[in-house]
Each structure stands twice: as structure tokens, then as C-alpha cells.
Image (cartoon, helix red, strand yellow):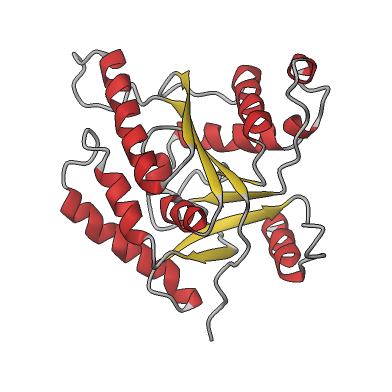
Amino acid sequence: MTDLPHAWRPDRFMVIAGHPDDADFGPAATASRWIDQGSTGWLVCCTSGDAGGEDPDLDPMELATLRETEQQAAAGVVGYAGVSFLHQPDGALANDLALREQLVREIRTFRPDAVLATDPEVIFYRDGGVNHTDHRAAGLAAVDAVYPAARNPMAFPWLAKSGLDLHIVRRIYLFWPNDPNVRVDVSSTIDRKIAALRAHASQIKHPEQLERRIREWAHEEGEPIGVDAGEAFRLVVIEEDEDEGPSVAATEATEAAVSD
């Protein structure tokens, strides 16, 4: 017996990522599917990936410019309405007040129903590997910016006084989780994810090998819901939609994630 694919779709959503290419390795296929269905998406990159190279003589600013250009191209493939680069230091990202203020500004400006970010609780992946420190910092800063800062007019009060009123994000989707509780059917958009990843030529040296791995991972994530390709998330429901009433499944999923 399989679970059902996650069906809820936000009208507006924001993906918050540590580096250029994180969103494309992460929820790009889900973002593409939602956009195809009528959602509007916005991407925020906390850093510009200026430390993402192997040549110590390379000018970090030149690399940052290149990686921003690659991310803009990838965002065009996915279909985001726009991209914001916060220009925080790559490799030294910190969940501090300065970063949270930037993220609150982005959230209150775009006003998303859902925010997608890296699961900050994952340090070691269950199948092996270490989650990058910037991924963890970006994820935790995103969560803290969503709740309580973006919805509290007395958090960074100068933002509210300048016209950026409080905004309530209804749901958080944490990607790369060890303990997912929802899965999205991305069979129709997995090709877009792969095309977006190909735009990051400075980072991807063997695109054919990467494509094979991405398709294998997507197939593994899709199997529990009986589809060819899926993406998995840890969903945290903050506010139920008024027009749909309490969602028992979503609430139970959230409670299970919190209790774990």
C-alpha cells in the first residue's frame, strides 16, 4: 500500500537557500510543478557561492558573479518570478540578526503562503554525508524569520514603519530531511530540475552522471507514493487554511515531526 502524493499548493511560495544551485538540487521539481499549476515562486540565495571553487587563485567576486548568472538562468528554467541575492559570506553564513532581518524583509515584500528551506536539524544524512554548515544556517534562519519574526510587527519595527507590514507564512517545507512526512509527485517536472541543474556549469563537471543520480533519487522518493519521481519534505503547518478547515493528515504529520 502506498501513501498519497501531497496535493496542497500555495498561491505564492519562497525558496530560501544557502547557495546558488541549492534550490535546484533541492525542491526545483516541486517549484516547477507548482508554477505550472498557477503558483508564483521567488528564490532567495543567502550567499553567492564565492567560495564554491577549487582554485585558490580565483577571484571570489568573479566566481560570485558567475554563479549568480548561472542561478538566474536556472531560475528562468524553473519559472521563478525573480531571485534575490543577499550577498552573505559563503562558508561563514550565520543565523544572526542581520541575516534574519534580510529574510524578514524578503518575506514581507513577497508575502508567500509557504517557505521552502533546508531542514536545519540535519547534520548527518542517514545514507551518509554531512550537511553543509551554510545549509543548516540558512534553514534555521529561514525558520526563525518565518516564525516569529515576519509575523511580529515589533521584530525589526523599522520595517513595519517603512510599510512592510507583518506577514503570516502558513507552511514551511523543509527539504533534504532525514524524516520526511510529505512527498510531491514531480514526474512531470523532473526534466526541468535536471535542466536547471545543467545551468550551474561551474559546479557540475559530469552532467550525465548527475542526471542519472537525480533520476535515481527521484524514483526512490516517488516509490512510497506510487509515482515515477518524487521530492520529499518535512512539512510544518503553522496556520491551517480557513477555506479547507483543519487538515487531520497535515496536523498529524506536523505533530509527528515535532515529537520526533
| Image spot of residue 186 (x, y percent) | 43, 64
Residue 130 visible within the image = no
**Quadrant of the image containing the N terminus:** bottom right
Report the side of 131 relative to 103 (left or right). Answer: left
Residue 107 visible within the image = yes
Where 121 sits versus 89, above or below? below
Give the camera-side residue of 71 and 121. 71
**Quadrant of the image containing the C terminus:** bottom right
Q: Residue at x 53, y 33 (%)?
A: 138
Report the side of 157 relative to 4 (left or right). Answer: right
Q: Residue at x 47, y 58 (%)?
A: 33
Report the side of 65 relative to 159 (left or right). Answer: left
| Image spot of residue 131 (x, y percent) | 44, 42
Q: Which residue is drawn at 56% across and 38% down?
A: 139
Q: Residue at x 38, y 45 (%)?
A: 24
**Which residue reaches farthest front?**
38
Give the camera-side residue of 102 and 253. 102
State how many labels appear.
0
Give the camera-side residue of 24 and 42. 42
| Image spot of residue 18 (x, y percent) | 46, 33
**Which residue reaches farthest bottom?**
1
| Image spot of residue 29 (x, y percent) | 42, 55
Image quadrant where residue 50 sits: top left
